[in-house]
Image (cartoon, helix red, strand yellow):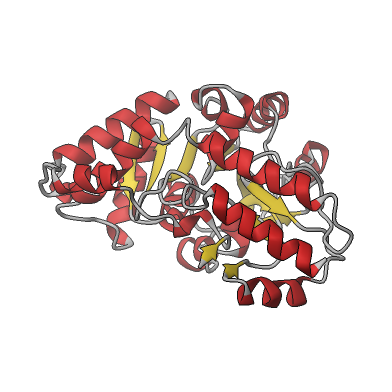
Amino acid sequence: MIDLRSDTVTQPTLDMLEAMHNADTGDDVYGEDPTVNELERFAAALTGKEAAVFAPTGTQSNLIGLLSHCQRGHEYIVGHGAHTYMYEGGGAAVLGGIQPCPLAFAQDGSLPLDVVERSIKPDDAHFAITRLVCLENTQAGKVLPLEYLERYSELAQRYELRRHLDGARVFNAAVAQAIPVSQICQYFDTVSICLSKGLACPVGSLLVGDQESIRSARRWRKMLGGGMRQAGILAAAGLYALQNNVARLQEDHDKAARVAEALSTLTGIRLQEDPQTNMVMLADDTAVEPLQQHLLEAGIKISGVRWVFHQDVSDDDIDQLLDACRRFA
């Protein structure tokens, strides 16, 4: 099967598996796993942050980031379709007592800053205390411009708010903009980074940030059951990915662009807009359910309007996909 549901379906390569097989390990809860320690040091330096903590999932790395900034009765401003709000089980509210203030995303994936500013609560006992503004980059495959991030950061700091980025695919954003990832991360206090998406690790995420936030996040990780023992086997995959798989993300962007260009010539399949990274997003008026069934019969899995390209999608796979789309259209 050709699987375009997500880049989470990627499989580790033989070189990554060899790195995992040869990893030095220790007890990470005691801070004694040398490979985990090296991954955290490398990630912090790469992102321009003071520290990092390795977590088993992106949901957990986001949650411990939010918990490191907010207490019960605090509020965080977030996109109404953002992963931290919509797709992580309500963890911030359920486990942290943190009230979300969801706002509509703009067409470009940003949160309109005038709306953000109006949503910041006054110092009044009637309201939850606004503490944090959370962005997502990429958001549905869209890259947030650096100029926007600078204005966002200035607004947050003016109101003494903390800044968290769900950067599950932040390396896709950096590659698309041809900049070091640290140029994006500089505008945030903490950034959550998935290793198990386009970077193609079997498992794992990172939270990077300042020393105090990461110290708090590490404590929350333990409380949430994310403290691991000989985790160097997993961390070795992450270290390999950061050292070898970042530039390769451009190949995924090119695959998405190739498919989008071909689909633009068909009458039965419409796109929202040209892809910026590794996602092709279909327009809402596309007959998704019949298309999904047609592609499944052709050996291709999709998930609604979002098609995600990754290292395990070959040129031959794309030829097969486009042939099936032409038959449908």
Q: Residue at x 11, y 41 (%)?
A: 24
Residue 90: x and y in percent read 55, 67
243 displayed left or right of 138: left
Q: Nearer the viewer, residue 313 or 47?
A: 313
Residue 295: x and y in percent read 66, 70
223 displayed left or right of 268: left
105 displayed left or right of 236: right
Residue 215 visible in this rendered orientation of the protein: no
Residue 304 visible in this rendered orientation of the protein: yes
Please identify the quarter of the rendering in which residue 323 is found: bottom right
Q: Residue at x 69, y 67 (%)?
A: 304
Q: Nearer the viewer, residue 149 or 274?
A: 274
Q: Nearer the viewer, residue 229 or 285?
A: 285
Q: Where is 263 relative to 258, above or below?
A: below
How many numbered discs, if any?
Answer: 0
Residue 141: x and y in percent read 66, 46
Residue 226: x and y in percent read 29, 58
Q: Residue at x 70, y 57 (%)?
A: 322
Q: Where is 302 relative to 133, above or below?
A: below
Quadrant where the C terminus sits is bottom right
